[in-house]
């Protein structure tokens, strides 16, 4: 009877990459933010986390989801940058000049190009631009908001709920910093041709010049995105990304007392993340990391390899040992094909699972003769219970 098997080893002197917001590699760091998450783009390592799964009202950070829906439609050819949409009275009153909120001052009943609307939303956080896009793409803002939440589930954002395209206060609307950081990472990876808008310093529309609301763009720390938000309930918030010397970090923060404090705390945390960690190659691509038992084959074991390099972002100091295990459902039944995924390499730091990568068979194992099968059956009968109860 197949059962879970473990190949156990120790990776001394190293510390693994964190893949869940509830686990944090980093040395202690203090921030005035009520919620925060700092993530390494390449490895998915969480360098710092504080209440990152708490629900908060999204404010203008909801526009990240609005833009993801727009970018996805553009990528599929359902929308074009030169396509135009009209400015309805609802869009004008709710998000335009009369609203007293962030706006690109689009004139009522005018028509705007999709590319101009994108720049208005990203650079100026324009609420009228969001609503014009929502109505143009889905017929109404309510319909578009439902599409936002459905798309969030597709992307793995399991709990965020969007009620409108702007992030303006609305009952039931909620996000978490952890899910917004995940969304920002996805946007950067999936839409490099559109991500550039987030680094745009200014945008002029209707003869009005407005600078990008992201204060980090002007701090010379490598920041090139993404957005800010504010609500009276949860304070000043930010989702940011910065790249320096080939390393990119994503940062989410909320619960700051002022825009000045938001900028300063974000700068401190990004610089700390850049300065206190280094990349370490743990296993090269296709490295032999262990073996799995084979039942009824010409040989009793098959080598296992990683399908990709296992790279970890590690603190420069105080690196405790790791425990690594290969977990698979075995023994494998012959014949075994080369290149088949049969389990995973799991890396723990203490009680925390900090990295998991698939492992694949490195070679083909042909079916053995009757004698070999009989021998394997006897071994399995005498030792299989040990695995089942370990």
Image: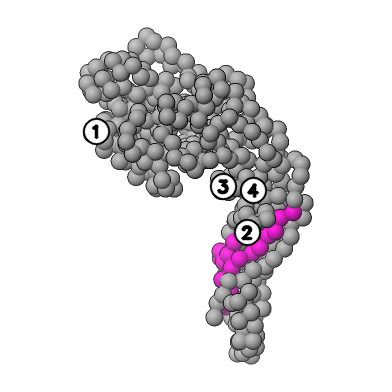
The quadrant of the rendering that contains the N terminus is bottom right
Give the class, few, some or many, for how many residues have Cα within 10 Å of label 4's Cα (few <14, many ≥20).
many
> What is the spatial separation of the Cα atoms under label 2 and label 1, in whole angstroms?
46 Å
Give the class, few, some or many, for how many residues have Cα within 10 Å of label 2's Cα (few <14, many ≥20).
some
> What is the spatial separation of the Cα atoms under label 4 and label 3, in whole angstroms?
13 Å
Specify whether 220 is left or right of 258. Answer: right
Residue range (magenta) = 321-345
Check contact, mark 2 vs mark 4: CB within 8 A.
no
Which residue corresponds to mark 4?
17
Query: Helix, strand, or loop for circle 3?
Result: loop
Residue 22 badge: 3
Query: Helix, strand, or loop for circle 4?
Result: loop
Query: Helix, strand, or loop for circle 1?
Result: loop
Residue 127 in the image, given as x and y percentages of width and height: 35, 24
Which residue corresponds to mark 1?
140
Specify whether 161 is left or right of 342. Answer: left
Q: Quadrant of residue 166?
A: top left
Q: Is residue 331 highlighted in magenta?
A: yes
Residue 59 in the image, given as x and y percentages of width and height: 40, 29
Check contact, mark 2 vs mark 1: CB within 8 A.
no
3 vs 2, front mark: 3
Residue 346 badge: 2
- Seen as rendered, the residue at the extreme top is 207
């Amino acid at each position: 009877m197949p059962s879970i098997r473990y190949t156990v080893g120790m990776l001394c002197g190293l510390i693994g990459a964190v893949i869940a917001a509830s686990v944090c590699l980093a040395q202690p760091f203090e921030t005035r933010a009520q919620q925060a998450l700092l993530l390494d783009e390449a490895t998915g390592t969480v360098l710092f986390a504080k209440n990152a799964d708490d629900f908060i009202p999204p404010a203008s950070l909801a526009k990240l989801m609005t833009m993801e829906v727009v970018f996805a439609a553009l990528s599929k050819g359902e929308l074009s940058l030169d396509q135009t949409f009209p400015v309805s009275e609802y869009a004008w009153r709710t998000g335009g000049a009369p609203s007293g909120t962030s706006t690109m001052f689009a004139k009522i009943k005018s028509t705007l190009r999709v590319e101009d609307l994108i720049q208005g939303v990203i650079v100026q956080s324009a609420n009228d631009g969001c609503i014009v896009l929502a109505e143009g793409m889905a017929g109404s803002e309510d319909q578009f908001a439902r599409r936002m939440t459905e798309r969030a589930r597709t992307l793995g954002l399991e709990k965020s709920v969007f009620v409108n395209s702007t992030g303006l206060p609305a009952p039931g609307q909620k996000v978490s910093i952890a899910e917004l950081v995940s969304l920002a990472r996805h946007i950067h990876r999936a839409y490099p041709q559109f991500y550039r808008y987030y680094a745009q310093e200014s945008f002029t529309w209707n003869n009005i010049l407005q600078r990008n609301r992201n204060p980090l763009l002007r701090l010379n720390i490598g920041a090139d995105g993404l957005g800010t938000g504010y609500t009276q309930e949860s304070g000043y918030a930010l989702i940011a990304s910065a790249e320096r010397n080939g390393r990119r970090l994503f940062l989410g923060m909320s619960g700051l007392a002022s825009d000045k404090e938001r900028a300063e705390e974000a700068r401190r945390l990004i610089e700390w993340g850049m300065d206190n960690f280094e990349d370490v190659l743990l296993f090269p691509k296709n490295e032999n990391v262990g073996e799995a038992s084979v039942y009824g084959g010409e040989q009793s074991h098959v080598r296992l390899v990683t399908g990709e390099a296992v790279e970890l972002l590690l603190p420069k100091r105080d690196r405790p040992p790791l425990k690594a295990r290969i977990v698979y459902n075995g023994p494998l039944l012959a014949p075994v094909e080369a290149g088949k995924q049969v389990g995973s390499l799991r890396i723990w730091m203490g009680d925390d699972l900090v990295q998991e990568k698939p492992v694949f068979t490195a070679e083909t194992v042909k079916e053995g003769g009757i004698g070999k099968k009989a021998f394997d059956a006897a071994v399995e009968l005498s030792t299989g219970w040990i695995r089942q109860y370990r």
